Amino acid sequence: MDLLIGNVFRRNAEHVPEHVAASLGEHTLTHGQLDADANRIAHALRALGIGHGDRVVTWADTSLAVLPLFAALAKLGAVFAPLNARLGADEAADVAALARARLFVADAARAEAGEALARRLGIPHFARLGGERGPGLLLEPEALGGPTTDVDTPELRENDPHVIFFTSGSTGRPKGVVLSHRTNWLRGFQGVFRDAPERSICMFPFFHMGAFTLALTAWHTRGEIGLVEAATAEQILAAVERRRGNRLYCIPAVWARILETPPDAYDTSSLREIDTGTSATPIELIRALKQRFPGTVTRIYYGSTESGSGTTLPDADVLRKPGSAGLPSPSVELRLSGAGEIQLRSPFLMDGYFDDPEASAAGLQGGWYQTGDLGELDDEGYLSVIGRLKEIIRTGGESVAPNEVEAALADHADLAEIAVVGIPDSQWGEVVCAVVVPKPGRKPRLEALQQHCEAKLAGFKKPRRLECVDALPRTAATGQVQRRLLVESIVSA
């Protein structure tokens, strides 16, 4: 039997039709409703000529209305390709053009711009999600009417494309990550034993791979995905309380916001799993989570849209292995290249980049995904991510090599140690930040560091920010500075 995403919706509707599949605020959607609504949309799209292999671009904020469309396309064998809802029309056009879609779908807020964009790109069909009036076909199940009978696509196979997630990659040029039905099915599968259905609260927006992976993971357990309109601490914790969420995955920066809220502001006693990852996780954050959420387990994940789960650090090791990303996840092979690049091979890997054979060949060499991350393995085989293969800081459109700035400041009289990193900044993209360990009795000043490299560096390469620390985080095996951990510590603080 093929591993098809449409079967997840069929089985849940058969066995737990009254159980909640998704929620947003006070609104819910049961598994039975989700499957029936998906069937109505699938029949309507099939009447438009949308079918197996066709790509469908969506441009919409997070809403329950997206989920029946997602399920409908899975049943038809059409490919779901979501755009970042925050993109402007020109930016959206640049990304959408890559997909060569047959249908463009926008929510009510973007319907006019979306319909114009579809015409501009020569996309044959346009539809909208919501809004009493507007261009295109209204993909509201009640408005569509039509049958709720199941839609079958006999020619669909598990290795056919299921979704395309767009990522800028290291070059900024948009790329479409193609994931098959089989890949997405396996990424969400949790095994055959669960004590209870998963009620997972999701911080990710609906253009992000993480949102749909978390949803499929919950649905594999016949559970629920709890959505929020924005990843604020208040909305996330309110969703935990309202839906009695038992799992919450947040990136470290969002966990830092949550920890700033009063401990008794929301009832989070239902939580059993509080997970994190995506970027380096400071040990101080883990300790704070342990204290704030007693009775929970914490796991750290390392992976990407292209690779899915790469490594996992289980609860038993999160305090014992500070800064580590863990061991290879089940069914994952991991190795380091001669240059120290992390390479992964597993059933969770992408099929490639859509319509980009050169990027696909570079990213997948001999079946191994080239992550671009630098890693180190300790004597127990645990991975630490210590930086990027090309650790270039992009600030104001210019490129800065950290080691060049470090060399210019290495002989400063106030500094015992220095590491240079890029800190995210809304104006500059990144700012050059000097993270220093002062010599005893010394108090470095940013202006003094800038003056010290006056004759050595161009103005845009000089540090714009200074952080003083007691020690630089280093790997256990070779003592290399963990730049990612430094960045996450600064951002979280």
Image (cartoon, rainbow, N blue to C red):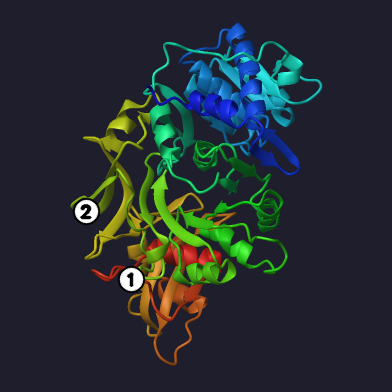
Quarter where residue 380 is shown: bottom left
Which residue type does callout 1 highlight? Arg
Query: Residue at point 37% right, 62% down?
Result: 402
Q: Give the side of residue 410 with respect to residue 119, left or right.
A: left
Q: Is residue 90 above or below residue 439?
A: above
Which residue type does callout 2 highlight? Ala
Give the mark nearest the N terminus, 2 or 1.
2
Residue annotated with mark 2: 339
- Give the position of the N terminus as an image quadrant: top left
Which percent across, then down, holds residue 172?
45, 40
Mark number, residue 169: none
Q: Is residue 212 visible?
A: yes
Which percent across, then down, holds residue 471?
39, 78
Residue annotated with mark 1: 474
Which percent across, then down, holds residue 400?
40, 57
Badge 2: residue crowd in 10 Å (few <14, some 14–19, many ≥20): few
